[in-house]
Amino acid sequence: MALTALDIYKKLPQTNCGKCGFPTCLAFAMQLANKKASIDDCPDVSDEAKELLESSAAPPIRLVKVGTGDNEIEMGDEVVLFRHEKTFYHPVAFALMVDDDSPDIESKVQPVEEMRFERVGQELKLDMIAIRSKSDDPAKFSSAVFTVKEKTSAPLMLISQNPAVIEEALKVCGSDRPIIHAATKDNYEKMAELAKSSDCPLAVLGDAGLEELAELSKKVKEAGVEDIVLDIGMKPLGKMLQELTLIRRFAIKKLFRPLGYPIIMFTQGEGLSEGLEVALGTMKYASIVVMKETDRSFVYPLLTLRQNIYTDPQKPIQVQPGIYDLNGPDETSPVMITTNFSLTYFTVAGDIETSRVPSYLLVADAEGLSVMTAFAADKFTADTCAELIESCGIDEKVNHKKIIIPGQVARMSGKLNENSGWEVLVGPRDSSGLPKYLREYSGQ
Amino acid sequence: MPLELPKEKWTGKIGEVVIGALESEGGTRTSKVVLGGATSLPFLSFEGEYPNEPPIGMEIFDVVREDYPEVARKPFEDVIDDPGKWAKKCVEEHGADMICIRLIGTNPEEENRSVEDAEQTIRELKEAVGVPLLVYGSGDEEKDAKVLEMASNVLAGERCLLGLAEEDAYKSISVASMANDHGIVAFSNLDINLAKQMNILLTDFGVKLENIIMDPLQAGLGYGLEYSYSVIERIRLAAFMGDKILQVPILCGTARVWNAREAFKEDASLGEAGSRAILWEATTALSALMAGADALLMRHPDAVACVRESIKGLTGGGEQ
């Protein structure tokens, strides 16, 4: 909730002195509300009013950075509760949890360094490593941190409520901006000091409700720590959802600063249950989810969900509509048509390449939807396909008038033939059938 | 100082629709489900009512296509050619709250099964299970008119859901649903205005709003899920803000997961196909719930089980 011109006016001297360059204080207030003037232009404003105006200009959720260099992760700075209201800006970071007493710590953290997926032109991966001190032994913990640091460049989180353990580990990785986890009501003074002196973000853990959490984050801030992350602790799933939602609302709707920070969440279950906890955090407002499982079949669907939820609603991931040449086509080559959802394009193009049959692939503007979704939503129809065939210039590239459509949309064949004058051939239902289909086609 | 919680005071309430009729109500069902009734966003019981745990129905077919994914086929290998047994297994072993049969075999472009054959299937299904039933046609308008009329009559008194009513094909299915007081599933494709328009078309035609369930198209994970997520959220928010015509329960299915090869194809670089597909379906289902779905239709028993567990965890949210 930004301040209105009237709110601002009430805080100004109301002298209409004109020193700011505007004739009246109200005119100045209106410019301030529209962010077209600076409060510094008023020489008589009180310190209290200045502070209020400056803080109301800060984002509702603080932007917190973890790690350094290429691996730096930004979190927070979200402005809406629902993605359709604008977009969600900073994708939730997925962190892998390892214990300092684990005998095979090196191999455990390997997936963070090595597991990479390519999906619709984006690289997907796990982002962070959270090292938990189970031993409560400063030497053991810092040696584990050292091992992990040697193995990977991913940002770290140091988990211990014992300041002595954290202090020792910061000697190993303090300059890498790890998150310190966590300050509690018992240790926050010492933890805040460590965070401040090492310039690292500090997680505050308050599992006794949002009031305690807000109190704690206030105290930590007063102690001089700016970069704070909130942890509501282990809760039943329903409670978790409710508190995550409330924190987001406190920050965005009430500009309540003590809860205006990114949120961290730890999974509690295993297997599929853990997967759905990660999914919940991804959809509902976590900025970091710390998980245990690293199987590819587990990580990949969740990375896909994150990619979906954090896609800008105004800009779906899509490829340019038009003609794509595959395997060096000539005037006798087959012509296929599909939609501009990038995943659809990559799948179909991949299967055509596998076939090694020289081909043209027409990509229709279906607003970035897949074939079946676009067909169901009337974005990939006989009309739009006919229009593309006519406008893209494919008739100058081939000496035939045959178009192959996806088998799933066989229903449009009659109408497409009518609208375009092209002979319509129904291709396989799934693009994986294309290699066989195309080899038979070119053999004809 | 105690914090004042930022609660939303919604004015709208989602209507409740009951599916299934017990013997005492003139049917033969042994259980029924209630969809809707919410006055809060999903699972946020601190600011309103979320009275009915979303039921999970399981989907079966009269005829299974040859290319039906192995992962989805496997748990039902022994019964997949017999819809009655398939349904029974879904209910008895996997706790399905409803059964939805898709009569794709009646499509003239596919097996073109006769209305009489479909009738036999429906009769067997009705005997096999006691949970509420949903009957979907094959998407062929002419054939569906006959098939759904038959289903309406054979299941008279059972209080089923018939589907799918679409913008350009809703009259005969509406007649079939009204004839025996069944509910109807109104399909719209990723478009809040069309979702609303469907409800207007149906009510103008004589269907009561309390007999309508909306299916706004749940895309699969990775294949437009974000569109569904936002459309469903927008529908639900509009309903809470007072749009009466959208105060109707939402039903979402995960069927499209089983069209997306990425979810279940053999590819070691994406991990084992079976567990990937199951999490793929479960994640799709959870996203529908978080956006506002009041009921689910799913396929794989393991995905059903873990989504049910999540629902239990979410409804046990407690007081704030």
Image (spheres, coloured by chain):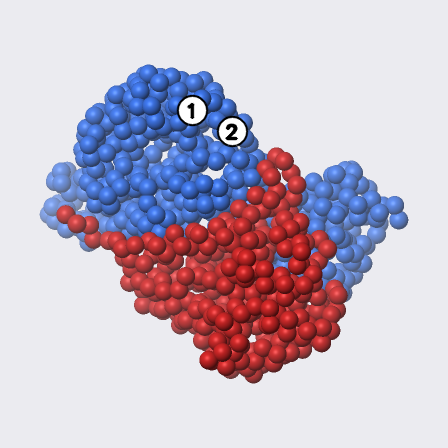
Crowd class of label 2 (few under 14; some 14 to 19; many from 20; radius 10 Å): some
- Callout 2: helix, strand or loop? helix
Q: Which mark is residue A102?
A: 1
Amino acid type of the residue that numbered disc 1 sits on in the rendered structure: Ser
Q: What is chain A's hue in the picture?
A: blue
Q: Residue A287 at x, y = what percent? A: 38, 40
Query: What residue lies at 20% left-to-right and 53% top-to-bottom?
Result: B4
Residue to which mark 2 is pinned: A111
Mark nearer the N terminus (1 vs 2)? 1
Q: Chain of mark 2?
A: A
Q: Nearer the viewer, mark 1 or mark 2?
A: 1
Q: Chain of mark 1?
A: A
Query: What residue lies at 27% left-to-right and 37% top-to-bottom?
Result: A205
Q: Left or right of B188: which side holds B102?
A: right
Q: Which mark is residue B255?
A: none
Query: What residue lies at 67% left-to-right and 75% top-to-bottom?
Result: B119
Q: Looking at the rendering, which quadrant does residue A286 occupy?
A: top left
Q: Residue A245 at x, y = what percent? A: 33, 50
Amino acid type of the residue that numbered disc 2 sits on in the rendered structure: Pro
- Callout 1: helix, strand or loop? loop
Q: Left or right of B195: which side holds B315?
A: left
Q: What is chain B's hue in the picture?
A: red
Residue B2 seen in render: yes
Residue B197 seen in render: no
